[in-house]
Amino acid sequence: MGTSSTLLKNKYWILRHGKSIPNQKGLIVSSLENGTLAEYQLADDGVAQAQLAGELLLKDLKDANIPLKNVRICYSPFARTAHTAKVVASVLNLPFEGSQRKVIEDLRERYFGPSYELSSHDKYPEIWELDEKDPFKRPEGGESAADVVSRLVKAMEEMETMFEGCAILIVSHGDPLQMLQTIINAAKEKEQDLSSSINFLSCLEAVKVPCVISKHRKFALETGELRAVI
């Protein structure tokens, strides 16, 4: 994803949750009400994926000479992301209670709407096709791609306000993390064309346009996949 921006206070990694019980069952579980249920946490394969991601992050941190005391884990409130974050914290030997971890509700899964909730994950391509045509159009009762981008910008603002000089691991879901990478990538390109006095977070908001966010599938992640983003 390129070099770090000079205009952010922290370095960021993203991690899609490990393979979950909904993944295993082929179910869409996207509402906050269902997503926080313990029955929808990680499958055994997902725990192994989260452990591997923690080991890869530990290597990245060592290579960059970043002390573990500077690590923060920010994660969606869903059971599958909280479970992933807890496994990673264990690998890093960090306490899972306290100042080094933070639940951020704006990192939650995209809500696909009542007609998709608890239905087959084979229906995801219908929504992504809609996103390509018009990322501001909502699936009935659900969130548009643009809706998700708006709350991701808020999440970035919250983390940048709360932390400074930290290595932040964002543990979230497929669609939100695709979209986050999309706007970060576009904002970095925009930042290069603008004065250094322009705030990077303002760039994130400025790139919330159809031609950018309609292409979020380019940045798809596998379950348990870790990426350094900025």
Image: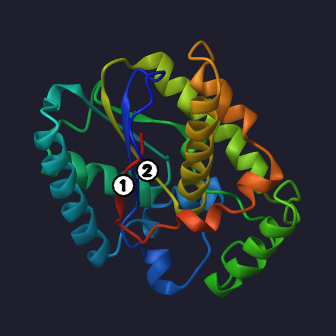
Q: Can residue 93 be seen?
A: no
Q: Residue at x 48, y 78 (%)?
A: 23
Q: Nearer the viewer, residue 27 or 220?
A: 220
Labelled disc at residue 149: none
For this view, does 61 lie left or right of residue 82?
A: left
For this view, does 122 lie left or right of residue 68?
A: right
Residue extending farthest top = 197
Q: How many C-alpha atoms fall within 10 Å of the one at disc 1: few (<14), some, or many (≥20)?
A: some
Q: Which residue is mark 2?
A: 1
Query: Whole-Å distance between the Cαs marked 1 and 2?
Result: 9 Å
Q: Residue at x 56, y 17 (%)?
A: 196
| Mark with earlier residue (1, 2) | 2
Where residue 103 appears, x then y in whole percent? 45, 37
Q: Residue at x 44, y 83 (%)?
A: 24
Q: How many C-alpha atoms fall within 10 Å of the one at disc 2: few (<14), some, or many (≥20)?
A: few
Query: SS for tag 1?
Result: strand
Q: Which residue is mark 1?
A: 227
Examine the image and state in which quarter residue 138 appears: bottom right
Q: Mark 1 and 2 residues: CB-CB less than 8 Å, in contact?
A: yes
Residue extending farthest front = 193
